[in-house]
Structures are given as C-alpha cells and as structure tokens.
Image (cartoon, rainbow, N blue to C red):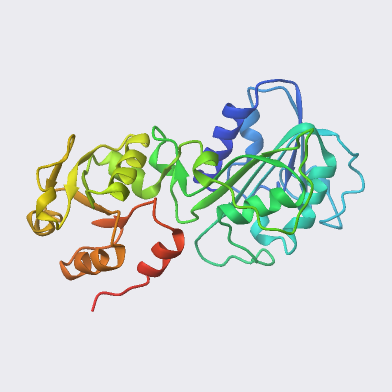
Amino acid sequence: MNKSSMLRMEWFIHTYIHTQPIRVLDVGSWRIDGHDCYKDLFRDIKIDYIGLDMSAGSNVDLVVENPYKWDTLENDSFDVVISGQAFEHIEFPWLTMQEISRVLKLNGLCCIIAPNGNCRHRVPTDCWRFYEDGMLALSKYVGFEPLHVSVNSAPANAPKEWFSQWEDCILVAKKSSQMSEFSYLPKVYDLNELNSNFLSSLEYRLLRDKCKVYVWGAGKLGKDTTNYLEQKGIHIQGYLDSNEKLWQQSEKYVVLSPNDILQKVKDNNMHIVISTAVFDIFKKCLDAGLEPEKDFSVSACQSSSTKAWLYSIQSP
C-alpha cells in the first residue's frame, strides 16, 4: 500500500472511528510483499478484522469467487468497510458498492481510496481513475450519505507524503437511517463542503513555501478568490489589475499594475492567482514566460471546465 494511501486511511480512522470494539471488512486486502497494509493502522483499536480478496495471500482471511456476491458474509454485519487501491481494478465498482451496503450496519461507515492518476497497472485489469464526482456517484448509487470526498488534497498540517503520483481520491460515506432514494437525475454536490477544508497540492505548496500570492482582478471575483484563499490559511500580498483607477485603492490590500509584478514572479517566490478575464490573463502569463501551476494558476472559484480548457493551452 502506498504511503499516501496509508496516511489517508490513518486520517479516516482518527477522524471518524470513536467507538470500539468494531468489526471491520477490508475489500481488496491482499498485502504485497514488503508493503504496509491497513490492518496495521488499527493496532490501538479493538477490532474484529476480515480481509477479503479474490485470491489467497498475505492478509487475506476470506477468498470470494464472485467479487459482486459475498455469500458467506451476513447482512448488516460490519461497523466499517474499507478499501484501498482496489476499486480501479474492479470492472463494475457500483456492484461492489451494493455488497458493501448490504454487509454494512445501519450508521456504519465506509472509506474508499483509489487513484486519480499515475500509470496503468493491470492486476489483472486497470479500469478506472476517480474524481470526486465518480466517488460521489458510487455513494449515491447505494443511497449513502457522503461525509468527505477529495482528490490529491490534504489537511494543512499534513506531511508532504500525502501527495504522490497516485493523486489519491478518498470517499468517506455513511449508511444512514435516512438513505436517499435513487434518482437518475444528476446530483451536483458542493465539493467545498465535503473536502474537510483540505488543501489542494497547489494550495499546500503556496502555504508551505510561504509564497507571495497576488490575485489578478480587484473586483468581486478577486475578492471571492481572496476570501477562499484566506479560508485555506493563505494570505495574499495584494491585487493586480489593469485598471489604473483601482491602483492603491483597495481598503485592505494594495492594487498594483500587472507590469510591476510579471517580470518578478520567477525570482521572488511569487505566485499569481487569476480570478477574472481568465482567457486573456492566462495568455499574458504564458507570454511572460510563466509556467502554469508553478508560477500562476486559475482561481478555484472558476469553473472546472474553464480551468481544464485553459491548462490545455500551449505557449506559442
């Protein structure tokens, strides 16, 4: 099990498990030689642990022939179901979620960790990479209440090992007594409400390296971006804006001409966050020789589709 996955599961245990003894099912529990496994993280908790997998091996207590039907396990028999680095290998993970729902007790918790990135690794198949909405769709499919979801993010005080090339996605969900009725209509969740105020890898770096952050755009979108960053503990130096009338006019932060900053970014531990006119400003940053994500980025308050399109732009 990779280090970043172990750290997330450890966080889940410390954050959500407050009673014992508990009964735990680990789906995809086979331990690769020389690697840690989740069972080790429960050493200080009284548990009845069962490791489930498709083939016999280290840390496997139960071998199932059908990955979508665990006949030997009774309904409502586990307090916690966990799974890590397994769902990407499962062809039909929504069917696995149905079995998790069946064996999980009322008000029981599940924690699923699976990669969002890195290379293909077929064991024996490699079918999926997960974003937050993918995990939430699995939770919705079985009527669970999502408690946390994030991708390649971490608490502000977390060690840097939380971030890896796997870009882990984690879902924590509850089998609630008021399980929602399934609907084919899309459900759009507020990801900020479900990420436990975790920092993205970029936000984590800005905070850790104490970068001098400037928000490009001193209007409403700029202020929204500033509020968002401050909620994450990231303080800005000021605003950049091409409107001369705004220079030096902000109540709290200085407003500067972009020309005063663009040529200084690389050598002065600076970072620009674009809040407005993103297409034009993104191009200006590229033309100034700045690198996306390293030297500048698009505000998290912008739509993900806009950011995805922009980051596909190549410098001429």
Residue 45 appears at what percent x and percent y? Answer: 67, 23
x and y percent of residue 96 in the render? 77, 53
Q: Taking the image as drawn, is residue 218 in sight?
A: yes
Q: Name the outermost residue toward the bottom.
A: 316
In screen coordinates, is 39 left or right of 243? right
Of residues 59 and 232, the one drawn nearer to the viewer in this rendering: 232
- The image shows residue 307 at horizontal and vertical percentages of 39, 62
Inspect this view and state whether residue 256 appears: no
Which of 152/251 is in front? 251
Identify the residue at the far front of this view: 245
Q: Is residue 181 above or below residue 296?
A: above
Q: Nearer the viewer, residue 211 or 125?
A: 211
Q: 316 or 53, which lies in front? A: 316
Give the total number of marks visible in the rendering.
0
Residue at 63% over, 22% down: 44
Vertical side of 103 occupied by 169: above or below: below
At a point 39% along the width and 55% down the height, the residue shown is 302
Q: Measured along the vertical axis of the image, is residue 61 above or below residue 46?
A: below
Q: Quadrant of the C terminus?
A: bottom left
| Residue ID at (75%, 56%) | 94
Indicate left or right for 106 with 210 as reference.
Answer: right
Residue 191 in the image: state x and y as whole percent.
52, 46
Q: Residue at coordinates 59% horizontally, 54% vertically from top-left?
A: 133
Q: Determine whether, in the image, residue 106 is placed left or right of residue 16.
A: right
Q: Is residue 316 left or right of residue 11?
A: left
